[in-house]
Image (spheres, grey):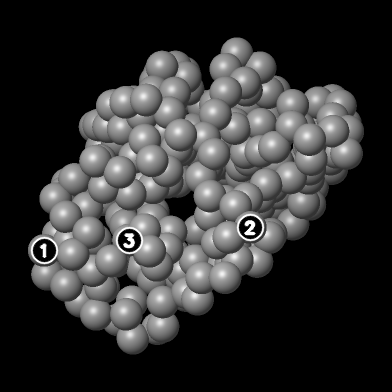
Amino acid sequence: MIKGFIGTSLIDFPSKVAAVVFMGGCNYACPFCHNPHLVQEDQMQFLPDMPTEEVIQKVAFRSNFIDGVTISGGEPTIHGKQLIEFIKKIKKISKKSPNLAIKLDTNGSNPETIKELLDKNLLDYVALDIKTIPGQYDQISKLVSSFEQVSKTMQLLMKSSIDYEFRTTVVPTLMDMQQLMDLADTIKGCKRYVLQNFCPKGVLDASFSNIDPYPVSFFREAVRAMEEKLNIKIIARV
């Protein structure tokens, strides 16, 4: 289940110093995925599972100087009950460090798991990847009716009391300015939205390594237009 661990990160949990846990496996096959070694079975075989208790010990050792733990992937929610039990163990450490928070990175495809985590007060922050406009979702995810589940997760987060962000990796050939404006209608009502620039290095589909990312000027224009439409602060990570 656990394929990687970073003891200290300053960029994976907004405003916090965090450890990062990487879980293997994903139910999507996004061509621009930058972690194919955590998605494709033939690559994951070279990454042995890390024992859960070993990771818990690593987190406990750092609990006096980190603020939280980010759980990423792959797609962590495909592990269902295992994920929930793992977070419960992290939260037990939190009794010694009351401010140790949990952030989950997810594609939103398992709203039932997200709901259970929210109901049990096991999450403090969720970063939900919105891959594209609804009509193109199946093309990206390689699943059928995939946006229906993501939409349920969106609604759960917007109704919850925890902090969260929706974020989109903007890939030329898959997302242009008009599609971003259309996407704004889909995410209307969200608390925080992040635009991420596409990185062509080490992507799942090798043909995407030949695509040049959008220039910074594109993101300036996108941020200005989306802020006007959504009336919230848009963050651009370029």
Label 1 and label 3: CA atoms lie apart by: 18 Å
Describe the element under mark 3 as helix, strand or loop. loop
Label 2 and label 3: CA atoms lie apart by: 18 Å
Describe the element under mark 2 as helix, strand or loop. helix
Amino acid at dot 3: Met
Assess whether mark 3 and mark 2 are in contact (beta carbons under 8 angstroms).
Answer: no
Depth check: give the residue in front, 38 or 231: 38
Residue for badge 1: 229
Amino acid at dot 1: Lys
Position of the N terminus, as image quadrant, is top right
User: Which residue corresponds to the image point at 53% horizontal and 50% vertical from the top-left?
Assistant: 31
Q: Position of residue 174 (x, y in %)?
A: 36, 58
Between discs 1 and 3, the one toward the N terminus? 3
Q: Position of residue 47 (x, y in %)?
A: 85, 38
- Residue 206 in view, yes or no: yes
Q: Give residue 175's mark.
A: 3
Residue for badge 2: 206
Depth check: give the residue in front, 230 or 27: 27
Tell me if mark 3 has few (under 14), some (14-19) or many (20+) residues whose alpha carbon lies within 10 angstroms of its own.
Answer: some
**Residue at the extreme bottom:** 217
